[in-house]
Amino acid sequence: MTEVRKDIPAISCRDVSVSFGEVSALSDISIDLPLGGIHAVVGQNGAGKTTFARVVAGIVKPDSGSLLINGKKIVLGNVASSRSTGIELVHQSFALPPSFTVAEALEYGSGGGVGFFKKGDLNNRWRRHLEALEMDIDPRHLIQDLPIELQQAVEIARALSSNANILILDEPTAVLSPSGIAGLFKRLRRLRDTGVTIVLVLHKIREIWEIADSITVLRKGKLIDGPMELGRTKPESLTPMIMGAKDFKENISRISDENSDNKVLDQKSISTLPKNKKHALEIDGVSTETTDHEVSLENMSIKVYQDEIVGLADVEGNGQVTLLRVLAGLSDISKGKIKICGQEATHLNLSKRRLLGLRIIPFDRNMEGLSLTSELWENWVASELAVTPLIRWINPMKIKERCKISMSEWDVAYNSPEQKASDLSGGNCQKLILSRELNDEAGMIVAAQPTRGLDIGATNFVWTTLENARSRGCGVLLLSSDLDELFKISDRILVMLSGSIIRELNPPYDLEKAGRAMVGESG
Amino acid sequence: MIEFHEFLVAILRSGTPLIYAALAGVIVHRSGVWHLGLEGIMIIGACVTIIGIVLTNSFIIAILSAIIICIIVSILQWFVIEKLKANQIIVGLGITGIGIGGTAFAVESIFGSLAAISAPFGIPRIGDTFGPYSGLSVLVFIMPFAVFSLWVLLLRSRFGLRLAAAGEHPFAARSVGANPSIMRLIAFCVGGLFCALAGAELAAGSLQIFAQNMVAGRGFMGFAAVIFGGGHPVGSAFAAMFFSIVSVVGIRMQIHFGNFVSHDLLLCLPYIATVLGIWITARAKGRTNSASQISELRVQ
């Protein structure tokens, strides 16, 4: 192990900026993580956590800035340089070739040179290493045959094979079951006690509280605060920092000011007492089976009236994705019922649900919302074709004309309907999706993170659109982990934790209360 | 007994170029690229060897220039795939076209006609001590060692593991500090060396002649052997050997049954065996999940 001094930070990065194309992933980050201990780096998706981890590990080369490890400057964007100072990164999706045996996977990253070996020696050497780490894994097994916990263990064993003194784990809990997480945390604590500095990239607040010694918060590529010692901070103050409601104190006072003389906002408090209104969406006691990849829903009930926007707040990883999959008919439910616009829809597929008026704006517009390699008009008409008979005459000229009209109405900046969707910016992509989904037949809109990654103008456009839909008599369910957004346009907010609705909040909203509710504290 | 020796000599003669081609395909395959340029690079190796012998009267110079030129063409293929991001299938076929057309062009511009060129001598023989096998070239003799060395390099060395990681999971290779692009370059260079040997053995091993398009699909059969052998050096060598046994049996059958069965059909046997071999391997799972199964480089 390289010689280390107590007073020098283990990782010290100065003014590090990274951008991918036009997207800025990290801007002028300066963080000093002290030697020893477990340091959590937290933030939402797209906050730049993974990029930060990869910059330190040398996989991503920053555009500017410098990086000191144990007081020594290292070459940026060079894995070998980072590894030689004792940094090892355990990836979110494990970076082990599936067809390798455990021993081979441990061997290929170690040392330099050609490195000839005998199979028996190789297995024995790595069996000893695994035993020393108290990992019960046969080095002859294939990686692809191992359960995900053991794959992660192998990755950690690989990282620790070369005298690592700084171990970075990127979202290590995302793939693990609760017992797997407990095992991982036990292992990490033991490593910390041997003097290894551990950096954990996380986004679940409960886990941070369980394991971390210090917390660093990133949001939208910027350092919000940190490293803060755990003892000096509270979970409820952390949520707003992660979610982007740090300055929300001002917003709250603004809303309450407006509240006094603004009819719309007055109405909000009334709309929680609906009379003679129909439900646009009724989810009644829905549960899903537990799977490895998704948080399961437990007895979830949500009712959305026609002409209201219901916000669904959760910290990511508490079942948003599962709920959306259930609503889209992609995940099976084990019990419960779903009604859309008053009609039974529990066992209908998505195209039937669309006919009932359900519209979904998915989480990832580039993967689920659009086909980036298809042309604009094809994307635009896709949802219409999905509910019509398979064999039908299609007239592209007519569709393109209609598409043009629609896109102009929705203010999509485009050159021609024959453009590829990948040419559009994020905001225009979202507008294209809105123009497709929010036609007159829409009765219930489920919008998942509809403004993520959008600039202010596009964000406002989306909000106005949802509000207009509400005044037309649509129900809107807004899934978001951005408290600013939820507070701004929701008529009421449901708080979701670990697959259940645990609280309903009504305006005027209280930031502290929301923050506490989202980490599962009462009060 | 003499019959058997003759049979074995024939198999080794026709099988050795195939095996070298398969070895070239194996290392490139494991690095993550389908090596469809084998045919083209192999014919360049054959052509340069014969022209080299004719022009310089030195086998050493001839084989060295064949190796160098084959490596250069391999690097060209790597460059277009890796740096210009072209589809590797199309590039491989393009290299094959360049090889076949380019060798014909070279022969015509040097010798003024497209007729077959014969060289005064070929690859040195292994010598009289080997009895009935004395007529075989030293490249046949070296072949088993080449297979073994490549096996050690690819399956019993850290370098080999990194090469396979670069092919199967480039991000994994990158995250331990190996550059997948450089790994592929090394694979292509070694592949160029083996292609040169394959071409040299084909043209100067027993015939000492270069004719247009004389490789006649052996490069593609070498590639088929790679798939048949699951990307494993020894498995692929045996697959290549199997193809050559089938082709020798086909020739023998022509002698015995030539009057009853169409000889075109018998000449087809190795190709039929290739298709059957691929079909069989498709049913049994291969050892490597090379990235190249999707025919485009994985970039992560």
Image (tube, rainbow, N blue to C red):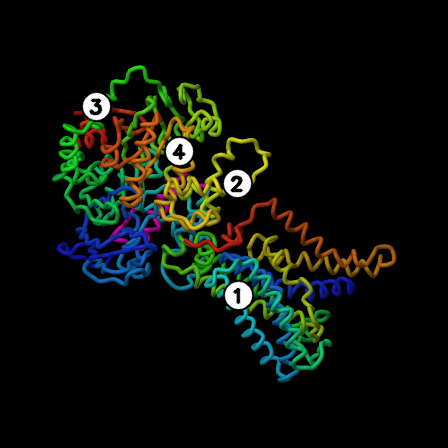
Tell me which label, 3 or 4, sits earlier in the chain.
3
What residue would you read off at disc 4? Answer: A438
Residue that label 3 marks: A269
Looking at the figure, which quarter contains the N terminus of chain B? Answer: bottom right
User: Pointers 3 and 4 in contact (CB under 8 A)?
Assistant: no
Q: Residue at coordinates 54% horizontally, 65% vertically from top-left?
A: B191
Q: Is residue A453 left or right of residue B137?
A: left
- Range shown magenta: A145-169
Residue A182 seen in the current view:
no
Give the distance between the C-alpha atoms of the residues marked 3 and 4, in whole angstroms.
26 Å
Are marks 3 and 1 in one subunit? no
Q: Would you say the residues marked 3 and 2 are in contact, meaning their CB atoms lie under 8 Å apart?
A: no
Q: Viewer-nearest of labels 3 and 2?
A: 2
Whether callout 3 and callout 4 share a subunit is answered: yes
Question: In this view of the protein, which residue sits in the foreground, B224 or A273?
Answer: A273
Contact, mark 2 vs mark 4 (Cβ under 8 Å): no
Q: Chain of mark 1?
A: B
Residue pictured at 64% horizontal, 70% vertical: B101
In the picture, the disc for residue B77 is: 1
The amino acid type found where label 2 is placed reads Lys
SS type, badge 2: helix
Kindly report the secondary structure that dominates the magenta region of the rendered protein.
helix
